Image: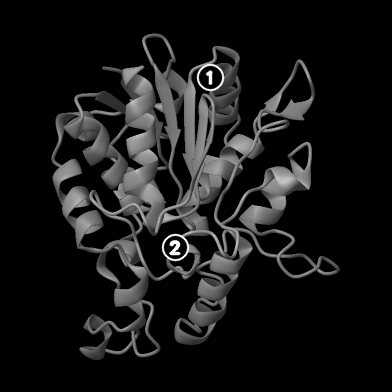
Amino acid sequence: MGTVLIPIPDRDFDPTEVAVSWRVLTDNGHRLTFATESGTPAVADDIMVTGRGLDIWSALPVLGSLSLVGLALRADKNGRDAYAAMVGSPEYQHPVSWSAATLDGIDALLLPGGHRARGMRSYMDSDILQSLVVEAFGRELIVAAICHGVLLAARSVDPGTGRSVLYGRKTTALTWAMEGLAWRLTRITRFWDPDYYRTYTEQPGQPAGYMSVQSEVTRALEDPADFRDVEPGTPHWRRKSSGMVRDTATDARPAFVVDDGNYVSARWPGDTHTFAGVVSDKLRL
């Protein structure tokens, strides 16, 4: 069995990508260590847990507790149940700080995501975490990244080469098709906070999607074709690409995971059971 380090921000991470990974890995006998910026227990993006705050009436008294769009975008029951169980676990309640985190005794580094800018930017911009990612690749540990976690990996530049650790790798991440669709929808339904679903937005003169996860990750790669997505016509491609169907512990058909040796990547919460399962299998080798 292996030991996995999961760094997360103090707030606003995606509950599914962290908690389902925790559940799959711990259920398979692996040991987990969490690291937060402050060294205190973190809190997930409350909107992704409850679904409240994504409907056009969300700011109104009484009506604000009702969800429609939020029910579609929030964590599903598997994700919410896993999150409720995870927050009570000893490892989650006693994280180390980013600055105190070490890879000594660690077999895998898992980088989850989240999109809410107020909490996630410090995570993806962190020099400490970027150095940790470079070290993990240098030690040839298993590195697993999902959604915006791939962006943290893409920004991690090896000082020996001056290139991203993902240069020469095959990867996926949150696609612009998924990110853009959720952003356009929530710009309308959460009109008072129209960029809730974009961690980074384009500056004047930049084309649409230039600051999307997919675009930034692709710019870090050796070849744009190294960014992988579901190809039309492949088995279950509609289920995999709709952004509406999530995998489960017993159904991997909606998931898309890229396995590139000691590096594993996935796109969004709907891939997490399969993503964490691949990591678990590698830890058993």
> Is 49 drawn above or below residue 187 in the view shown?
above
> Is 217 drawn above or below residue 210 in the view shown?
above
Which numbered disc, 1 or 2, marks the residue closer to the eye?
A: 2
Which residue does the image show at 35% across and 38% down from the upper left?
276
Which residue does the image show at 41% across and 19% down from the upper left?
100
Label 2 sits on a secondary structure element that is loop
> 144 or 56, which lies in front?
144
Q: Please identify the quadrant where the N terminus is shown.
A: top left
Which residue does the image show at 20% across and 34% down from the upper left?
93
- Residue kind at label 1, given as amino acid type: Ala
Decide if residue 192 is on the left or right side of residue 201: left
Q: Which mark is residue 236?
A: 2
Instruction: Provide residue 95's location: percent of width, then percent of height.
Output: 29, 29
Instruction: Provide residue 253's location: percent of width, then percent of height.
Output: 37, 56
The image quadrant of residue 184 is bottom right
- Give the residue at mark 1: 136
The image quadrant of residue 64 is bottom left
The image quadrant of residue 41 is top left
For the rendered model, the colour scheme is one colour
